[in-house]
Amino acid sequence: MSLKFRDLISKTIGFRLAMWYSAIFILSSLLFFTLSYFYLSESIQQKDREVIQSELDEYIAQYDAGGADALQKEVEFEKQLSGKNHFLVRLAGPENDTVFMNVPDKSGHLDYQELENRGQKKHGHWFYLKTKGNKDILEVALQRLSDGSVLQVGKSVIKRHELLERFKEIFAGAILLVIVIGLTGGIILSIKTLQPIRNLLAAINSIINTSNINARVPTRRSGDELDELSMAFNKMLERIETLITDLKRGLDNVAHDLRTPMMRLRVNAEMALRTEHTEDALREALGCCIEESDRITAMLKTMMDITEAETGAMKLNLEEVNIVPLVADAVDLYGYVAEEKGLTIHTALPEALYLTADSNRLRQVLFNVLDNAVKYTPSGGVVDIEAFQENRRVTVLIRDTGIGIPAEEILKIWDRLYRGDKSRSQHGLGLGLSLVKAIVLSHKGTIEVTSEPGSGSSFTLHLPVSSASFAS
């Protein structure tokens, strides 16, 4: 394996995840073994000490009852009864001189000096005694008797050590299996865990290589974070696909609506070139060209305004505004159009409604919504306008009896350049309502629409009264 390949492998998330899992698994196993070892050691030691202490108590009772002779007889009786000699028993007088000594079988040569040294000490109930050559170890309990004598009882712990050594040997053999299981488990875990990410990368590479955003990431419906990431990515792709579709349709609309003023602009310029160069003819041609360029400029400016409002870059000239005169101006402006179409505009307005806002931007909102209502209401229809204040916000309701909006198009009417099938017969680019919503949101307000095809639509604007709503 080359150094470059090893370096690449070591930098992958899958490798690191497998190594982390393996390390945690192996270290956890080692910790479990260590704790088990100490628990087993403590348990066996406690059991041995209970046995030694029981023998010590029995010997003390015999000594108290009959002295050294009774103690010696008890030791001999136990040896005959069991057929084995398990315990070290030493009885020393008040001056630490050995009165009686029983040495266990196969104990080797005891270090008697250590026994005597221990007998002189007033403290230290338990101690370990090694035979000469360290071939055996005894655990000894010491008890000073009522008459000043010292009784020492001990038992070999070699079997305890053998059991613990066997335990360590078993674990040493099992550790290889633990390492294999840890590495295998880490690899399987990394593969299963990172599979959603691999699927995500495959989808991304497919989109990059083919420019086809129809690719989707498979989901497992497990509900974990990686599955949520896959579902969020799929939703993002769906949203992007929708935006691209809307953009294409919007560009088609822009191209279609720009074609007419551009053609008129060209026709006017060509007519000026072909006719006699009189001052009046040139002025008329230039005037027509300016008018068409103004239409194009207005459309582009509207699109820029929407972008500024949506990104929060729109500059608002906030001041205390009475919205009632603004509504009245909109009604006056579209009153003539409504009269020509045979429409009736009804208003229900108080004397004044003050709020903090940009009056010019609010005028754009009211004009666009009212223009929409008048444009799509047939002859004989009615447009109602109502304004009032409640709960620290101003509400403006514009309701018409027009053609209405299909349910599947209600959410789309706010999209930039969107025009429904029924609206294509009317002049416009589909930017008015997008601009309305953008301006209302920039004022920290909301706008709602309810509609029923054939019965009309209702647009409701909610705008905060106080400028404190803009402090964010």
Image (tube, rainbow, N blue to C red):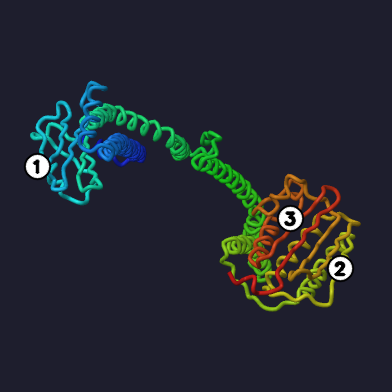
> Do callouts 1 and 2 mark residues in contact (Cβ within 8 Å)?
no
> Which amino acid lies under the numbered mark 2 shown in the image of this protein?
Thr
Vertical side of 322 occupied by 383: above or below: above
**Quarter where residue 398 is shown:** bottom right
Element at label 2: strand
Viewer-proximal residue among 222 and 65: 65
Task: Look at discs 3 and 1 and give the one toward the viewer.
Answer: 1
Quadrant for residue 151, please give it: top left
222 left or right, relative to 174: right
The amino acid at mark 1 is Gln
The residue indicated by pointer 1 is: 113
Mark 3: few/some/many CA within 10 Å (<14, 14-19, 20+): few
Under circle 3, the secondary element is loop
Whichever of callouts 1 and 2 sits on the residue coming sooner in the sequence is: 1
| Mark 2 surroundings: few (<14), some (14-19) or many (≥20) residues within 10 A | some
Q: Disc 2 designates what residue? A: 347
Give me the residue at 80% from left, 59% from top: 373
